[in-house]
Image: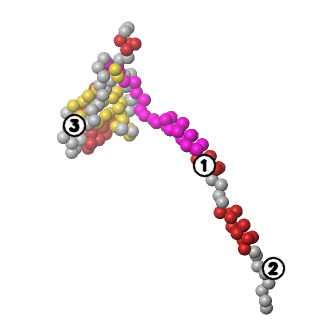
């Protein structure tokens, strides 16, 4: 029972098969990743959404300070705190909860210029009932073109 050399695969043939499987071509993978990167870079600025409001214009520029809460009221009368929409009937309770442990109670009101004045006064009244000490109104500065008229 002698072993013959013809029945066993040769060493060079075994190495040749192994080298083909271990070489992975990553060029198509890199191409796909670069295309996806470009797509995300182009579409990312378009995905930023916010609450669309037209602020009234004033000669003085008013911007909220770092501390305080900004209430945004859209043209439809919806009240927003950050990205969440708040029912106007629950606004007083939400404000009281937010400012429960805070010493400075400051709210900045950012209302659409086409919003009826009565709605703005109602929201200001609700914030005063919640114990807010100071209410600021945010406006846009008047453009240089508008000043010349």
Frontmost residue, 5 versus 141: 5
Q: Is residue 140 left or right of residue 126?
A: right
Q: Is residue 25 left or right of residue 68?
A: right
Which label belongs to residue 105? 3
Q: Is residue 126 left or right of residue 75?
A: left
Tell which tag, 2 or 1, sits nearer the viewer.
2
Measure how far apart labels 3 and 2 are at the Cα level: 92 Å
Residue 45 picture location, percent across and down:
49, 35
Which label belongs to residue 65? none
Tell which tag, 3 or 2, sits nearer the viewer.
2
For disc 2, the marked residue is 6
For disc 1, the marked residue is 30
Q: Would residue 39 be counted in the magenta stretch?
A: yes
Q: Which residues are magenta?
A: 34-58
- Mark 2 or 1, nearer chain start: 2
Measure how far apart labels 1 and 3 are at the Cα level: 53 Å
- Specify the quadrant that holds the C terminus: top left
Asked whether disc 3 touches disc 2, contact meaning CB atoms under 8 Å apart, the reply is no
Tell which tag, 1 or 3, sits nearer the viewer.
1
- Name above or below for residue 109 compared with residue 37: above
């Amino acid at each position: 029972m002698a072993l013959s050399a013809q029945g066993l695969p040769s060493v060079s043939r075994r190495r040749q098969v192994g080298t083909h499987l271990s070489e992975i071509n990553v060029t198509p993978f890199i191409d796909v990743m670069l295309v996806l990167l470009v797509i995300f870079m182009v579409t990312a600025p378009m995905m930023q959404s916010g609450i669309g409001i037209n602020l009234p214009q004033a000669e003085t520029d008013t911007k909220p300070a770092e501390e305080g809460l900004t209430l945004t009221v859209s043209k439809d009368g919806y009240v927003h705190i950050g990205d969440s929409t708040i029912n106007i009937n629950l606004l007083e309770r939400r404000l009281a909860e937010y400012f429960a442990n805070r010493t400075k109670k400051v709210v900045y009101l950012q209302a659409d210029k086409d919003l009826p004045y009565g709605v703005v006064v109602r929201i200001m009244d609700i914030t005063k009932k919640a114990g807010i000490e100071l209410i600021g109104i945010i406006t846009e500065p008047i453009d240089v073109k508008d000043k010349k008229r």
